[in-house]
Amino acid sequence: MYAYQEHDQRIVNQRVDQFRDQMNRYLSGDLSEDDFRPLRLKNGLYIQKHAPMLRVAIPYGLLSSRQLRALASISRDFDKGYGHFTTRQNIQFNWLPLEKVPDVLSRLAEVQMHAVQTSGNCIRNVTTDELAGVAVDEVVNPLVWCELIRQWSTLHPEFGYLPRKFKIAVSGSSVDRAAVKLHDIGIIAKKGDNDEVGFEIFVGGGLGRTPIIGHSIRDFVTSTHLLSYLEAIMRVYNRYGRRDNKYKARIKILVKELTPSVFAEKVEEEFIKTRVSVPPLNSAHIQSIERQFSTYQFNNEDFVSFEDLVHLNDDLAYQTWANRNVKPHRVNGYSAVYASLKKTGSPPGDLSASQMDAVAELADRFSFGEIRVTHTQNLVLPHVQNKEVELVWRELTQLGLSSPNIGLVTDVIACPGGDFCSLANAVAIPVAKAIQERVDDLDFCHDIGPLELNISGCMNSCGHHHIGNIGILGVDKHGEEWYQVTIGGRQGLNASIGKVIGKSFPRGDIPQVVENLLRVYVERRDSEEERFSDFVERVGIEPFKERVYSAH
Amino acid sequence: MHIKNRIVVDSTWTISDGDTQPLGSVSIFIPYADWLALDENTRESRRDTLGAWLSVDQEPGDLNTYPDHLAIQFLSFTDGRGYSLARILREENNYSGDLYAVGDVLRDQLRELERCGFNAFVLRSDQDVRASISAFDDFDYEYQRSVVSKSHGANSAVK
């Protein structure tokens, strides 16, 4: 965990006071709806279909047990007793009374949390690998860099009114679990000569109406100049990004219109100046941030290896779960244990207040009080001793959080959809449920193997359907809910955008369509090692089309 | 009424699209190109009441002569280009005269505008100018070095 320094706390407290004053002026009529909207959005507050929605930042997905308990009590005291974890590692409350929001922010501030820049046309919460500092394949721990970026971007005076929202993700592993190529800025931390830390910078990736894979514009920015380089990118975007059309205002359009190489040149020109105007990150400052992160006393008593933990119980249910939901830790004898928020029938990413309290308790008992939020809307207990993994499984099972489906087709990623969101064309959660029910047969599910299925209720793509191996998008047809299906999308360093298979389907057909797609894959793949999207790349979309539309 | 160096001043400034005649006691900003076209005597004799305004998409590299009073006009407070332009004028062009934010300028933007180098503000007419002064003190710490942290010596993570 990053523990706030005194000034971090002061900023958050003062932001609460500032927002309370803005809210008071709005409620008293001194501040018009138009003037208030950008101010409330910059603090994560939407006016939604049924009630206001508040999006709370969980910087880079790192959460303490104390914070999770506070979220539980907020959901109990102000909302309907649950929260929704998002694909950007945040949490949303969907039923808050507007006038109570400043009180909620005060409660958050007590546990070093806030809603700063979780929405609006500004730099959003920075995201990273859920296994940061834990993963065996990690080259550079991204957490300290994420915190430096969080601080630099927080209330940055120059970039509060960008053309559009702006998302930054950081990865420090040889495998990308942060979808860096699908962000406005994607950063891969790596090591250069003499083990010097530096960063490869991608720009212009993103989903939405125009999905684009980001372009690498610099192979290696030294750590000293990370922030000045980011500032140069932001300044070019702030000055030249389109403001005439909301749908063309993201940085990806600017990069595309200028071409990536011309954009890169403009950034380099600006970088000559920002290298001087932005103070370099010196090692003393970096270390002062590093010191604020918790360090843990790992224990080697009763050592159980990662390979052996699956044998702690002969129960097939345990073994299936352990093989699927437990990932190795860089410290021998420890593992990262996933709590699945994708039990069939419960809305993806939702967690009740009592489950939050219980997970906080588990984190205290087994994981140094630390929890991670994943961009696939699950939770992780990142530091569990292998000998205790079986016990954690029992506890998670009691809580309904042990579905053995991390990374499988039933681990559906979905936005809140038309049930909650006023932007959505169509519902997402009931579709997720219908698909889960259709493919819930465990053997079939495990036979399919790793597969990402994403659902978005509209073109805003909060459910990241473009990069789902199977993507489902809600569209409006004469006031009816229909769904467009894409296949072949992929995250990671080899990211790709899915292709539309053909005309859209009514809601009731979707489970059968998904099953047909899966059957084509399972019947015709080279081997179990050939992943769904690799198969699509090899055979094209025709075999899928044939099956899906002839069956129709 | 406007704000200058965090103090409410009774006199005020207005934006003109070309007319150079002051309206009573109101000083005016004319388009930068028009100001540049004036002869030096006129500029000098009216330096206290005649300034120039820039639009937010002005290329700062083209500027090298400045009036004592320079304004950036905000047509919409959500257009953030003026913030970058102000910083460049201060940090790269080394403009040291008064820099005014004029137009759709609201209380809730004052602090950020100041941190980007504006020191004078002609607020939108519906704003309560006196009450707005407190907005400068909404925060007493900043994570980034800004134009202000150099001149005011405010607390900052990186000095």
Image (spheres, coloured by chain):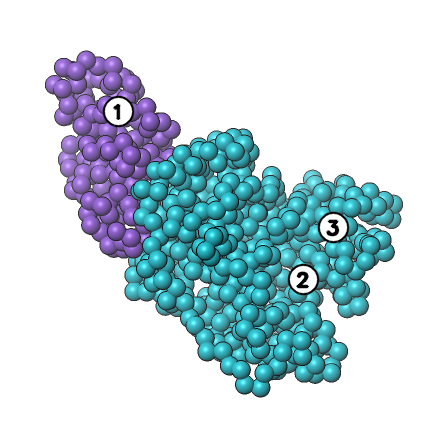
In the figure, is residue A469 to the left or right of B67?
Answer: right
Q: Which residue is mark 3?
A: A534
- Nearest the camera: A244 or B10? A244
A457 in relation to A358, above or below: above
Rendered location of residue A373, percent (x, y): 54, 64
Cβ–Cβ below 8 Å for labels 3 and 2? Answer: no
In the figure, is residue B8 to the left or right of A461?
Answer: left
Whole-number angstrom distance, CA of label 3 to CA of label 1: 57 Å
- The image quadrant of residue A436 is bottom right
Q: Bin the neighbour count of mark 2 within 10 Å (Cα to Cα): few under 14, some 14-19, many 20 and up.
A: some
Residue type, mark 2 in image: Gly
- The image quadrant of residue A174 is bottom right
| Chain B, chosen colour in render | purple
Q: Residue at x 22, y 25 (%)?
A: B66
Label at residue B158: none
Rendered location of residue A134, percent (x, y): 53, 67
Q: Bin the neighbour count of mark 3 within 10 Å (Cα to Cα): few under 14, some 14-19, many 20 and up.
A: some
Please tell me whether mark 3 sits on a helix, a strand or a loop: helix
Residue type, mark 3 in image: Asp
Q: Residue at x 37, y 67 (%)?
A: A291
Q: Which residue is mark 1?
A: B64
Q: Which residue is mark 2?
A: A407
In the figure, is residue A338 to the left or right of A39?
Answer: right
Please tell me whether mark 1 sits on a helix, a strand or a loop: loop
Q: Badge 1 sits on which subunit?
A: B
A415 in relation to A545, above or below: below
Cβ–Cβ below 8 Å for labels 1 and 2? Answer: no
